[in-house]
Amino acid sequence: MKVAYQTDIGHQRKQNQDRVNMFTNSHGDQLMVIADGIGGNRSGDVAAEYTVTVLGNRFKEEPPQTPLEGIRWFARETQLINGQILAQSKRSIRLQGMGTTMVAAIAFKDAVVVANIGDSRGYILHQNLLTQITVDHSLVNELVKTGDISEDEALKLPQSNIITRAIGISSDAQIEVNRFDLNEGDQLLMCSDGLFKTVERDQIIAVLEQSVSLQEKCARLVAMANKAGGPDNITVLIGINSDQEG
């Protein structure tokens, strides 16, 4: 999979608490991770940085061999990282209350295993259809699931930034993990909420379908989020399952 990513502070935050990286193991499999630190000035960036770095190191040291192993690997490693962040929080007043969302994916041959906790998202673009493949762990999504509000209304509510799960907040970091098949030319989009809360879905699709480099697609999506006000940090990662494009 060819991959590009970009992160940006946005226009209204004093620091960028998003972290993003990609890691390749000795088998050629790839791990892609985005973490969006929470806790405001309570070192959310520390939790995000720790999550991305430790998960990447573990992927290179003891990687899963198959998609099924990948599902178990994500559950185990996320829980370990969660415990380590909680322990750090207890040792330092400065770090108390820190946490992070996470969306991560392992690209195997023609399949991807995607894990998330919080409201950072993953999507797959297949034949012009953009499908969200993660579940938002947020207060407003609970209202969407019960039919009390629509998805569009959820993005506009002031409570849209309240998440119900995260790494580093409680002793049980419940993640969602699923396996998806990838076809030739399919694109994987991962992002923090700074993108999808400001840029419309059809605008995202239009950029993904442009015949420009993956890096340029990332840059254009970030620019669109900033043009819409850039109220939050913005992080975008795009991968394409193709040897010909990117």
Image (cartoon, rainbow, N blue to C red):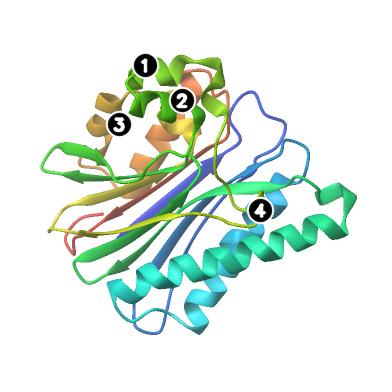
Query: Against 109, is 97 above or below?
Result: above
Between circles 4 and 3, the one closer to the viewer is 4
Q: Which residue corresponds to mark 1?
A: 149
Residue beneath the point at 37% across and 16% down? 149
Q: Earlier in the sequence, mark 4 or mark 3?
A: 4
Is 219 rendered above or below residue 175? above
What amino acid type is highlighted by mark number 4? Answer: Gly
Q: Position of residue 192 (x, y in %)?
A: 48, 40
Q: Are marks 1 and 2 in contact (CB under 8 Å)?
A: yes
Disc 4 target residue: 168
In the image, residue 144 sits, relative to residue 85, either above or below, namely above
Q: CA distance from mark 1 to mark 2?
A: 8 Å
For disc 4, the neighbor class at 10 Å (few under 14, some 14 to 19, many from 20) is many
Tag 4 secondary structure: loop
Question: Which residue is located at x 42 percent, y 79 percent?
Answer: 25
Can residue 153 be seen here? The reply is yes
Mark 3–mark 1 Cα distance, whole angstroms, equals 23 Å
Picture coordinates of residue 37, whole percent (x, y): 63, 45
Marks 1 and 4, Cα distance to the nearest angstrom? 29 Å
Label 3: few (<14), some or many (≥20) within 10 Å?
Answer: some
